[in-house]
Image (cartoon, rainbow, N blue to C red):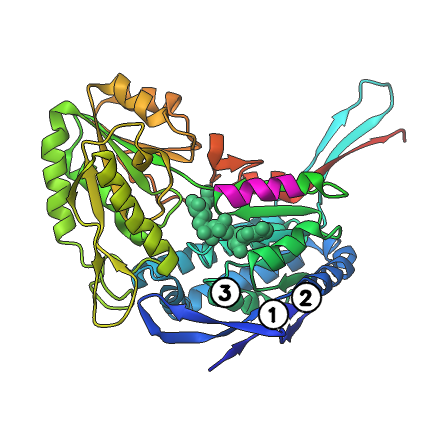
């Protein structure tokens, strides 16, 4: 069995402990033993990153471009193999895994270009003879903490801008999916990133993550994960001495509104894709489907019909639509919400039971609830599994109010053929991303990603907006 190590100061380093990486489609299949880092490993990684920073922060845009471009090229060339690894460790289907890997490559190519487009401002001063320049500089050493549900895309959309803008990095991937992050770091190392610029420490959040939060040599933390962890991270960053810059992308309870005038086929596609693809384990999943009275019954019948045709099976098997839940704990949580929904008085139309397949895995039938109300836990708490609830409302105004009646604000969708309602929804949905006749999940790689309210904190990720987090602004005054 392979022994996967941490990457510190340009070397692959054995950790004192290791843990098995298990395939959720087949728990007999172990991908390897992966390092369980310690706080001492974090100390060494930060020291290496600090030592590398003076040179990397002054490297030419061409050098950084070339590293990122070569990284994107190799990821793309190996997308099938890396997609397989990703699907094997996380459980999304092979086409979804390959799609995510392709996106990671595109992100590296985008930020390779951004290396060459870093600009500042030169202004006339309000004082005679003085010149003013506003420039951006890297922040320093950035700590990246990532979740399990996008094992390569999220590390990619944090590492690529961090490096593009001249920062050094310590990354801690989620315990459940270290393999994809390890493969990515290996590619970037071979693409020529200098020793110490990028360091990988795998392991537990409570050990490795905590050590990153406490280390004074880390200047900023970019985190994606759950709300409770995000809150604790923000508090730790503010309490740190010196304080750390922080960016949080957290949970969602994303609404998909379906109006009477919607194209039924489009609406059903959006609901089934948004709620159940990637096993519902997307922060942008459509977990609340808000449907107006006139189309409600036809819509529910059509969604149920489509759900019956969904194949839940091994993520690597051809023809699988929905892979397993990521692990036993998450499956238990998903199943507990089925009981909660029933106890709250919602009607389970179909699904929600554990499934057995040829291999031992964490399979669950996608579940659809109807007759739900806004105050049910089903509609208020992020489940993060293949569970969706339908809320019946009278009209568009009630639908918009229901869509915004949540502590979250990541993505919001509407299915309608009305320009009036789609325009109004785009303006008034309290979300960072709004989709019209598209699923709430599934976004472009070159534009900002993020939310409002309880979903996000700090500046946006991805696209040109990433520059806000990964740089700090300097204003210089000169009297020539
Ligand atoms: P999580 O919060 O349990 O863990 C996220 C990361 O934080 C992991 O690497 C974990 O090890 C680390 N961590 C845990 N405790 C820590 C601590 N005390 N100090 C430092 N680090 C710590 O989340 P998860 O279960 O891996 O991911 C699922 C969650 O992520 C869902 O809530 C989902 O909505 C969210 N998510 C959000 C986005 C987004 O962009 N908004 C994208 C994907 C996932």
In the rendered image, which quarter is residue 36 located in? bottom right
Mark 1: secondary structure: strand
Would you place residue 456 above or below residue 126 in this image? below
Q: Quadrant of residue 408?
A: top left
- Would you name the residue on which mark 3 appears? 178
Distance from label 2 to label 1 (Cα)? 8 Å
Q: Residues within 10 Å of mark 3 (few under 14, many from 20)?
A: many
Q: Tell me the magenta residue range.
A: 227-236
The CA distance from mark 1 to mark 3 is 10 Å
Mark toward the start of the polypeptide (1 vs 3)? 1
Circle 2 is placed at which residue position? 41
Q: Secondary structure at mark 3?
A: helix
Q: Where does the image place residue 407, in percent across and percent down from the top left? A: 43, 30
Mark earlier in primary sequence (2, 3): 2
Reading the image, the residue beneath label 1 is 6
Q: Residue at x 21, y 65 (%)?
A: 356
């Amino acid at each position: 069995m392979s022994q996967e190590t941490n990457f510190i100061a340009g070397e692959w380093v054995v950790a004192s402990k290791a843990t098995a990486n298990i395939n959720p489609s087949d728990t007999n299949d172990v991908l390897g033993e992966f390092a369980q880092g310690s706080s001492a490993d974090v100390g060494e990684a930060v020291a290496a990153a600090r030592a590398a920073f003076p040179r990397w922060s002054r490297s030419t845009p061409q050098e950084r471009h070339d590293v990122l471009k070569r990284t994107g090229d190799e990821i793309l060339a190996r997308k099938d193999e890396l997609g397989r690894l990703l699907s094997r460790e996380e459980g999304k289907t092979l086409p979804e895994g390959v799609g995510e890997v392709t996106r990671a490559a595109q992100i590296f190519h985008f930020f390779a270009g951004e290396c060459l487009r870093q600009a500042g401002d030169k202004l006339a001063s309000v004082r005679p003879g003085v010149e003013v320049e506003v420039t951006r500089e890297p922040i320093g050493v950035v700590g990246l903490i990532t979740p399990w549900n996008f094992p390569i895309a999220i590390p990619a959309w944090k590492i690529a801008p961090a490096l593009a803008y001249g920062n050094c990095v310590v990354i801690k991937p989620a315990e459940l999916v270290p393999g994809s992050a390890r493969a990515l770091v290996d590619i970037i190392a071979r693409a020529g990133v200098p020793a110490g610029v990028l360091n990988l420490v795998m392991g537990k959040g409570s050990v490795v993550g905590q050590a990153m939060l406490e280390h004074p040599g880390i200047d900023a933390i970019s985190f994606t994960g759950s709300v409770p962890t995000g809150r604790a991270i923000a508090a730790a960053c503010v309490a740190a001495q010196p304080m750390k810059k922080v960016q949080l992308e957290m949970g969602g309870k994303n609404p998909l509104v379906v109006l009477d005038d919607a194209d039924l086929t489009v609406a059903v596609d959006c609901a089934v894709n948004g709620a159940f693809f990637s096993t519902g384990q997307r922060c942008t999943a459509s977990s609340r489907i808000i449907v107006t009275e006139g189309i409600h019954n036809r819509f529910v019948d059509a969604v149920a019909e489509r759900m019956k045709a969904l194949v839940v099976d091994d993520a690597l098997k051809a023809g699988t639509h929905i892979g397993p839940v990521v692990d036993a704990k998450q499956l238990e949580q998903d199943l507990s919400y089925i009981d909660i929904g029933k106890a709250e008085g919602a009607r389970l139309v179909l699904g929600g039971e554990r499934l057995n397949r040829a291999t031992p895995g964490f399979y669950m039938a996608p579940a659809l609830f109807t007759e739900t109300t806004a105050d049910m836990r089903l509609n208020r708490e992020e489940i993060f599994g293949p569970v969706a609830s339908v809320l019946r409302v009278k009209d568009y105004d009630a639908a918009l109010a229901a869509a915004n009646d949540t502590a979250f604000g990541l993505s919001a969708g509407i299915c309608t053929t009305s320009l009036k309602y789609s325009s109004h929804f785009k303006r008034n949905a309290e979300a960072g991303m709004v989709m019209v006749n598209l699923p709430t999940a599934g976004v472009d790689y070159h534009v900002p990603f993020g939310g409002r309210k309880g979903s996000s904190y700090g500046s946006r990720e991805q696209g040109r907006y990433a520059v806000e987090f990964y740089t700090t602004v300097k204003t210089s005054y000169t009297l020539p």
